[in-house]
Amino acid sequence: MTRVTGPLAAVLLLSILVGEIGGAIWVPLRGGTVLAVVAATLLAAVHLRHVIIVGQVMAGLALVSMIAVLIWAPEARPQLWNAARQGTIFSAFLTSLGLLRGPVRQSRFIGLAAETLFSFPPRLRPATLTWGTQFLSVLFNLATISILSDIANAHGQRAAQAGRAGVAQWPVTMAAARGTTLSTMWNPVGVGFAIVTTSVAGLAAGPFLALACAAAMVLSLASLLLPGRGAPPRGPGDPLPQPIPPGGLQALGLTLLAVAVMIGLTLLIHSVLDVSFLVAAALIIPALALSWPLVEPGLKAAAQTGAIPAMADAARVMSNEATIFFAAALFSCGVSLVIGGLGLTAMIASGALPALVVILLALVAVPFGAAVLIPHSISMVLVAQILGQGPIGVAHPMALGLALCCSWCCAIFASPISAISIITARYLGVSLRELCFGINLPFTLVAVALSALMVSGVYMLD
């Protein structure tokens, strides 16, 4: 399969960059986007029998939706093409993200940066971990939880052997899980942020990134102040600060610098070349993945596998997400036409259905669906595509965008089938039901309420 998926993934990534970036400079190069759509479709078809059942179902629904639009609503072909284009951009972005996962997970340098977070005083450690892991998660992604939990476990075992108090694994795991989840609100190379910036019409990525990050910091503070089983422990019984590992501060500083540079370059390309934030990220991420082994010599051996095998592995690792998002984008086109036919779009445009009510319903709908086992990735794409391209997305992009980012974050807390919940429950040794509907529930409800207040405030100013 590598001989097929590797070249297809390479064609997908290169052609979307040529079509979207080059096409903005010279119109004939926009044909690259057409080639990218073909490559994304073939890649999804090749991976289809290996993806999870949800992805297979979504692919079937997307095919039915596409055929229905072509037969009964041929005038909507431009919307269908736009949905295919957005789905292709999602696939290219996710494939590029797969290229970065290998270097990050194998990097001793990044592991050292994470370990340095434990050297802060015990009373500051919960805040350090909650806020610090948000920024590290830009590179770590889900690995943040396992890395920090493993480090805490190792520290605790060493302390027990020495007969002294050690770092407790439970609060560290909870802080890492919450920091990782909250980072999904603003992580510029995260899936949730990508869905919002791609789907909501007229959304300025730079100012919105600052808004989403500020909202995430507010929810982080709430998580630290909220009492309960998931809250970090405080008191004189806390262990003494851990020693700073050799080179730890340097590693932490350079890691945060790498995150800042990646965000800055992505914003720069987005602004200068006038391309979507997602396309800009799809250019920066592979460049970072390819240059990383040059900076960290220990990764050079891993980088010698070759470009095509690396692309094939990246496409395989992200095949579930890429298939779901590509299919959901196509399916949303048909759904939006049905909603328009029912008159809901006209009601919103006329003000008969208040925009703020619709936005707040969207905020609540995705977490509620996640709690009843509807994959939040699917519901998020559908809601974002339907509302983002309509009158609400045009008139109130910042409020709608913030509501969707908050909704995505709260859905992860509420979903027993999210990857973060599964990893966290395994490290805590609890059931997914206990985690989502017991430990996480108080904070999820508080997060939804605070999010509604913040969204309402932005709506008044938007």
Image (cartoon, rainbow, N blue to C red):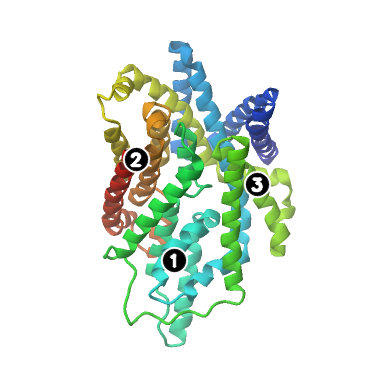
* Image spot of residue 208 (x, y percent): 45, 44
The quadrant where residue 240 appears: bottom left
Give the amino acid at mark 3: Pro
Element on which disc 2 rests: helix
* Image spot of residue 197 (x, y percent): 48, 38
Q: Nearer the viewer, mark 2 or mark 3?
A: 2
**Is 307 displayed left or right of 93 in the figure?**
right
**Is 441 displayed left or right of 103 in the figure?**
left
Give the amino acid at mark 2: Leu
Q: Nearer the viewer, mark 2 or mark 1?
A: 2
Element on which disc 1 rests: helix
- Separation of marks 3 and 1 at Cα, in angstroms: 28 Å
Check residue 230 in the rendering and tell me which mark sits there, or answer none.
none
The residue where tag 3 is placed is 286
The residue located at (56%, 34%) in the rendering is 89
The residue where tag 2 is placed is 461
Contact (Cβ within 8 Å) of mark 3 with mark 1: no
Res 245 visible: yes
The quadrant where residue 358 appears: top left
Q: Earlier in the sequence, mark 3 or mark 1?
A: 1
The residue located at (39%, 24%) in the rendering is 336
The residue where tag 1 is placed is 129
Callout 1: few (<14), some (14-19), or many (20+) C-alpha neighbours within 10 Å? many
Give the amino acid at mark 1: Leu
Q: 304 or 409: which is nearer to us?
A: 409
Q: Earlier in the sequence, mark 2 or mark 3?
A: 3
Element on which disc 3 rests: helix
Q: How many marks?
A: 3
**Is 315 displayed left or right of 340 in the figure?**
right
- Separation of marks 2 and 1 at Cα, in angstroms: 33 Å
* Image spot of residue 33 (x, y percent): 63, 28
